[in-house]
Image (cartoon, rainbow, N blue to C red):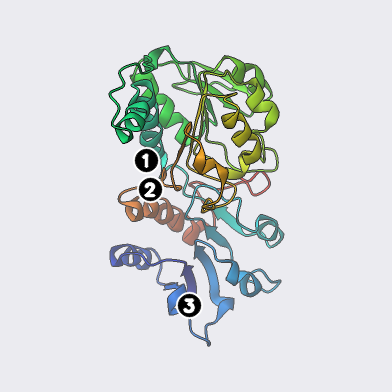
Amino acid sequence: MTKYILSTRSFREEFIRQMREISTDYQFITTEEIQSSFEWNKVEITLGWSKDWADKLLVPSTSLKWVQAISAGVDTLPLNEFAKYQIKLSNASGIHAQSITDHILAILFMQSRGIFEAINSQQQAHWQQDVTINNLQDLRILIVGTGKIGQRLAKCLEFLQCHPIGINTNGRAIEHFHETYSIVELAPQTQKADVIINILPLTEDTHHLYDDDFFATMKKSATFINVGRGASVDTTALFQALLDHSIHFAALDVFEEEPLPKEHPLWTLDNVLITPHISGYTPHFQKAFMRIFIENFKSFATTGHLIKNAVNIQSGY
């Protein structure tokens, strides 16, 4: 009996061919190809997830066994239902590590060399040489989240002779981090940091982790960078901290509400950089994504197990 791999997006023929070479039991089909007579009870694997599938696939009679998320974060997926029906889940963690690292490094270099100030002066045709210049190596950079993205960033910073500090669940040592601390030590580490970078996944524990109390512990000269999840930040608290200059600067790529509404007061501030959730944009995405999926598919087709990027549904990562 033919089983379906249902995808939210199309992939190049070379990857479809690889799937067929692994197993002829499966047929790849995209959302756009679904017709009214589609047999939902034959869907065993999905690439990505659509909420429109829930009433068809998250039912007691489901044949769905595995969801391969297209993103690294899985907080928007129906994790409770996946757990209820014992559906395996894997993510795309690691694909975006270099892209997000490059994005963060660009911000750090632009800020340490006074480029943001130069841009503002240029818009006013003002020759301003009194700009703030820092050595990147002198900054205490705190990376909150020591997963694949955090590790790639730490490795690059180490190459640049920086000494990145890491925050993770239990403070375990991670390669390329000069020091690591547990999440319960976030506040005392925040007090000492010149730059705080959020790369955490969104869970119940990390929702609004960055609130009034957090921003009150930051140095007034410090920078906050968020490339993790928008809902990790209490946006109202961050806006007030920036407005009052309780913190120096923020670079935000993710937001609680996206797109950020045109009327949102964050747009009016001159000490914030807003980018439209682009830090993870990755050249050759299909090739990188399929490295994960094909390796997992080989294992799943023969053993029923995932060997790469499996997600613990209870923890959400």
The percent coordinates of residue 14 (x first, y second) are 28, 64
Mark 3 surroundings: few (<14), some (14-19) or many (≥20) residues within 10 A: few
Residue at the spot of label 3 = 2
**1 or 3: mark nearer the eye:** 1
In the current view of this chain or complex, which residue is farthest to the bottom? 37
Mark 2 surroundings: few (<14), some (14-19) or many (≥20) residues within 10 A: some
The span from disc 1 to disc 2 (Cα, nearest Å) is 7 Å
Residue type pointed to by label 3: Thr
Residue at the spot of label 1 = 99
Left or right placement of residue 22 versus residue 207 in this view: left
Residue type pointed to by label 1: Ser
Seen from the viewer's position, the closer of residues 262 and 189 is 262
Mark 1 surroundings: few (<14), some (14-19) or many (≥20) residues within 10 A: many
The percent coordinates of residue 126 (x first, y second) are 30, 27
Residue type pointed to by label 2: Tyr
The relative height of residue 196 versus residue 70 in the rendered view (above or below) is above
Q: Determine the image quadrant of residue 216.
A: top right
The span from disc 3 to disc 2 (Cα, nearest Å) is 35 Å
- Residue 241 visible: yes
Residue at the spot of label 2 = 281
Per the image, label 3 sits on a secondary structure element best described as loop
- Quarter of the picture holding the C terminus: top right
Q: Determine the image quadrant of residue 294.
A: bottom left
The span from disc 1 to disc 3 (Cα, nearest Å) is 38 Å
Per the image, label 2 sits on a secondary structure element best described as loop
Seen from the viewer's position, the closer of residues 132 and 284 is 132
